Amino acid sequence: MSLQDPCPGLQVSDNGQNLVMKFAERKTFLFHLLTNITYAVIPRGSIDQKTFKINDYRNTSGPYYVNAYPGAGNIKLKANPFHYHYSDKIPQNIKIIAFTKYLKNEEILGMLSDKTIDYLRISAVLKPEDKVDFVAANPGYNIHLSRPVRMLFVLFTERGRRRLSREERFFIARKLRGLYPLRRRMLEIPDQIFQMEGGLSKMQLREIQALLNTGAEVVLKKKVEAKRLYSYFWLDGDEIKKWMPKVEYQDLYPPKSSKVVHEPDFYLFGCDMGFQDDVGLLAYYLDMDFFSMTPAEKGKWFADYIASQDKNARMRMIQALQYKTLYDARALPIGLLPYASVARKPWAFNYPPAIAGDALWRLRRNLKWTLK
């Protein structure tokens, strides 16, 4: 790969100032993909000519651009007046405060109280009720809750799929699905990854629900290594050991040598669930060891998917893909939660409820509130 490689369908004009796209056929997902950094168009002068790493973030097609790097991981953003979402009512200057060390939830929320920060994004303090409780106890803040779109999965690695039977994998998921709601107020228990477009058929859903929610109570006596299990179930270790007594937490007990540790049998991670025909979300999942496909099969599947002009055909592709992934007990859903963001008044949210993220250009000052 080099900067001289041909790019069919792409042209530049006005001495490189304008990018022109001309294709022989319709590109259904073109503009969706261009919003993903993986497929973004980067100015030649903003990348290292040998490594292709981005070294200048000031050029942007978004509502903000990087204006300065104060140091210590902090970044200053400035509103981009040439963006179609620009308004003099949006935040004009933003300073991103980096967390340079591990902080407990109470410490992060304390940064709001002492006015170190004015906005707490969705990725900090992930438990939404912690933010709800903070806003209820501290006047002077607004909170935004998305719909339940953040899904927690248990994902069984290649090693775990060799060592644990399909029934044992469903058993682990079933026990965690029963345990996870006990310490969380704002939670749903999902049965599939894509609920609307690409959702399972009624027959498929009944079959997966039976596998997820019913089965014999056993004690799994194998040594099982898990990652991020402690992160999500740190208060439930005694309960887990009743049915998985030889579990070892890879993230709790660091390795004693510098050698590469083998992968765990399973790990937990959170990601968004799918409602609509979301090519970006599919690309993210395909980049992981998530779906029941080889790398070559993933490439062909994705190429066929984005090439299809028939939405119904694409939905059938997603349905078949998620059914096989669930049926094979490769990635199984544990819980579904909303995202939450907190802003100091007078800033008020105007965020769409079904989309996760911190679209700061949507913030507006609510003039009914004044800061004291």
Image: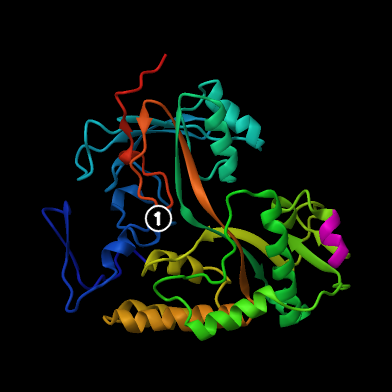
* Region in magenta: 238-243
- Residue labelled with disc 1: 354
In the rendered structure, the answer to whether residue 342 lies left or right of residue 213 reads: left
Tell me where residue 262 appears, x and y as whole percent.
75, 67
Report the quarter where the N terminus lies.
bottom left
Question: Is the stretch drawn in magenta largely helix, strand or loop?
Answer: helix
Q: Is residue 306 visible?
A: yes
x, y percentage for residue 5?
30, 69
Q: Is residue 42 above or below residue 170?
A: above
Q: Position of residue 228 (x, y in %)?
A: 70, 56
Tell whether position 242 is magenta: yes
Residue appearing at x 42%, y 82% in the figure: 317
The residue that appears at 86% across and 61% down in the rendered structure is 241
Q: Secondary structure at mark 1?
A: loop
Residue that appears at 58% across and 71% down: 289
Q: Nearer the viewer, residue 93 or 43?
A: 93
